[in-house]
Amino acid sequence: MVTWSRVKSPWLIHMNTGSCNGCDIEILTALAPKLDAERYGVKLVGSPRHADIMICTGPVTDKMKIAVVKTYEQIPNPKFVVVVGSCGSSGGIYKNSYITLDGVDNVIPVDLYIPGCPPKPEAVFFGIAMLLEKLSSGKLPDLKGEIL
């Protein structure tokens, strides 16, 4: 019953860890009426205590490191982290910068990467659908670092 409810209504929390907002716009477009992710129960929530999936964009800056870890710890188990965009995956154009820690996986464990700069809304939607498909198999997915 718990797995069914997680698959039928995954709640997302979006965290911008220092990006240029290109990926943020694509995430919102994926949740907008054109693709209509809400018909599948996907909902963007404002509190990490209500979320199942954390979507991160951008390289983690020194200033955001503590906030990312605290937000991740507040999400109830089982929790999943999806990184959207090249900057969140590897640091992108900010790689080896004096202010960034490069990818999100240097701070918290990542389950799924959606590459692109920025990725299309369809790719974001497909990535979340792939995560839900693996979750609906009845066992927790072993995605750890899977690239879409």
Image: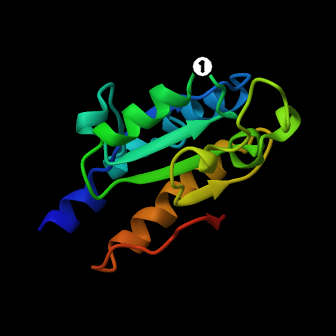
Residue 124, compared with residue 44, is above or below; it is below
Q: Nearer the viewer, residue 104 or 101?
A: 101
Q: Residue 140: where, in percent of width, then height?
A: 34, 73
The quadrant where residue 104 appears: top right
Q: Report the residue at 26% width, 55% height from top.
A: 77
Q: Residue 136: where, in percent of width, then height?
A: 32, 73
Q: Residues within 10 Å of mark 1 (few under 14, many from 20)?
A: few
Residue at the limit of the structure toward the left, as seen here: 1
Q: Nearer the viewer, residue 73 or 86?
A: 73
The C terminus sits in image quarter: bottom right
Could you tell me the amino acid type at mark 1?
A: Lys
How are the colours assigned in the image?
rainbow
Q: Nearer the viewer, residue 81 or 39?
A: 81
Residue that numbered label 1 is attached to: 63
Number of callouts: 1
Q: Report the residue at 64% width, 27% height from top.
A: 25
The N terminus sits in image quarter: bottom left
The quadrant where residue 28 appears: top right
Q: Report the residue at 55% width, 30% height from top.
A: 65
Give SS at disc 1: loop
In the rendered view, does 14 fall on the left or right side of 22?
left
The quadrant where residue 87 appears: top right
Q: Report the residue at 15% width, 64% height from top.
A: 2
In the rendered view, does 80 fall on the left or right side of 117?
left
Q: Residue 66: where, in percent of width, then height?
A: 48, 28
Q: Residue 37: where, in percent of width, then height?
A: 44, 44
